[in-house]
Image: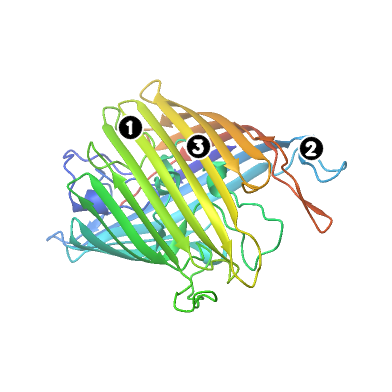
């Protein structure tokens, strides 16, 4: 896959001390910390407005194992060609001294996903902040990392692909991550070591911008919403959300976190999904190390009369800056997509290289990933075969030109 992302970057600030502009005026798309570029602000400094953009273009080549084809006439090469994974335009800023805000549109998406983020954050104090709107839910290090600063051009397969079920559900089949959603979150940083996030969300994901929920059928008193929380311990100070940066080759930060969520009767009164996760990430000079595991239980409602299904996934990844501009990357990913009561496991090694151009504003990523399987991995449903995507991905090339423009 070849990924070209063009955004708008800013110049590095001379003063490295984190102020509110740097620390909280962020957007989960491109890093703004320590960068001043173009911006609008009042003389008093109580209002700040920074536009930004990120465009990614990709080229993919996917070859499928013969056992993964639906018929003898299907082609082994499929889902290949050019794509625009993201074309994001947004703005972030602060107002009234205590409020930060962010809004971004992703022109590469459609429907409700066109609105990627829209939130404001009120800082009562450092240890108590309130965020309202559409933003990332507090689950999974890989998903919470800044989009333009990830080690690989794609999320781990176990984090992004839906599970497989032997029967239909009333809504989209869930995956391990909870992604972007609408809701309210209380969060804060305590003693520069503990970061907590607790929130309530719709549980319908990035594609829905409307209030569509009701109360649960099995528990009439409980609204069918997503309840989520995350607690991170950072013994060396606040952990950046990048997965390695050429501008921070002398950093030493670590994060150990646990997270959990409960999506009450998530699939339109079909099942309640409980997720738990544990994660570790460490940036030490030129090294970046991360590992996390996650588990999901689908508890079906009484009307469904189905037994619970349990799924798990895990990955570890390693990055190292061979030179100040060239970063090597390795990852191994596991996914029990069929549920623990059935055989079958996906294991997915990946390797890549990242190279930075033009004052680190352009990033080229090259990735190779193989998806292997073991055990019973196919399900038959009313005469149809559901595939597990036996992917052999020879190349995923990602050119990321991230020009972060703060107007």
How packed mark 1 is, by other alpha carbons closer than 10 Å (few <14, some 14-19, many 20 or more), is: many
Helix or strand or loop: what does disc 2 sit on? helix
**In the rendered image of this protein, does residue 200 appear above or below residue 154?**
below
- Snapshot quadrant of residue 100: bottom left
The structure residue drawn at horizontal position 21% and vertical position 41%, both measured from the top left corner, is 13
- Snapshot quadrant of residue 376: top right
Numbered label attached to residue 146: none
Residue 184 position within the rendered picture, expressed as x and y whole percent measured from the top left: 35, 67
Residue 94 position within the rendered picture, expressed as x and y whole percent measured from the top left: 24, 61
Residue at mark 1:
283
For the residues labelled 1 and 3, the Cα–Cα distance comes to 17 Å
Residue at mark 2:
67
Residue 390 position within the rendered picture, expressed as x and y whole percent measured from the top left: 70, 39
Q: How is the image coloured?
A: rainbow
**Left or right of 26 on screen, residue 176:** right
**In the rendered image of this protein, does residue 395 appear above or below residue 157?**
above
The structure residue drawn at horizontal position 68% and vertical position 46%, both measured from the top left corner, is 342
Helix or strand or loop: what does disc 3 sit on? strand
**Left or right of 246 on screen, residue 222:** right
How packed mark 2 is, by other alpha carbons closer than 10 Å (few <14, some 14-19, many 20 or more), is: few
Figure label count: 3
Q: Earlier in the sequence, mark 2 or mark 1?
A: 2
């Amino acid at each position: 896959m070849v990924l070209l992302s063009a955004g708008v970057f800013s110049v590095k600030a001379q003063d490295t001390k984190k102020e509110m502009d740097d620390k909280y005026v962020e957007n989960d798309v491109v890093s703004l910390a320590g960068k001043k570029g173009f911006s609008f602000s009042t003389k008093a400094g109580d209002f700040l407005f920074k536009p930004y953009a990120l465009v990614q273009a990709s080229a993919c080549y996917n070859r499928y194992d013969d056992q993964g084809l639906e018929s003898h006439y299907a082609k082994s090469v499929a889902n290949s060609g050019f794509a625009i994974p993201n074309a994001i335009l947004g703005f972030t800023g602060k107002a009234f001294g205590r409020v930060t805000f962010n809004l971004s549109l992703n022109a590469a998406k459609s429907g409700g996903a066109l609105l990627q983020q829209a939130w404001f954050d009120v800082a009562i104090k450092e240890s108590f902040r309130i965020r309202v709107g559409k933003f990332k839910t507090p689950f999974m290090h890989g998903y919470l990392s800044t989009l333009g600063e990830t080690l690989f051009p794609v999320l781990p397969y176990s984090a992004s692909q839906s599970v497989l079920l032997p029967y239909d559900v009333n809504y989209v089949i869930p995956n391990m991550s909870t992604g972007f959603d609408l809701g309210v979150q209380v969060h804060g940083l305590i003693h520069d070591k503990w970061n907590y996030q607790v929130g309530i969300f719709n549980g319908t994901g990035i594609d829905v911008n409307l209030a569509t929920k009701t109360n649960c059928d099995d528990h009439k008193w409980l609204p069918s919403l997503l309840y989520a929380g995350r607690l991170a311990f950072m013994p060396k100070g606040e952990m950046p959300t990048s997965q390695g940066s050429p501008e921070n080759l002398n950093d030493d930060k670590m994060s150990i976190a646990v997270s959990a969520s409960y999506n009450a009767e998530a699939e339109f009164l079909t099942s309640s999904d409980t997720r738990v996760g544990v994660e570790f990430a460490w940036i030490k000079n030129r090294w970046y190390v991360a590992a996390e595991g996650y588990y999901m239980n689908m508890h079906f409602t009484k009307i469904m009369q189905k037994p619970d299904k349990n799924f798990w996934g895990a990955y570890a990844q390693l990055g190292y800056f061979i030179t100040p501009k060239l970063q090597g990357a390795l990852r191994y990913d596991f996914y029990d997509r069929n549920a623990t009561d059935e055989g079958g496991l996906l294991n997915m090694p990946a390797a890549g290289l990242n190279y930075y151009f033009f004052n680190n504003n352009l990033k080229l990523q090259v990735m190779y990933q193989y998806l292997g399987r073991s055990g019973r991995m196919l399900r038959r449903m009313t005469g149809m075969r559901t595939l597990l995507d036996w992917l052999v991905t020879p190349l995923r090339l990602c050119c990321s030109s991230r020009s972060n423009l703060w107007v």
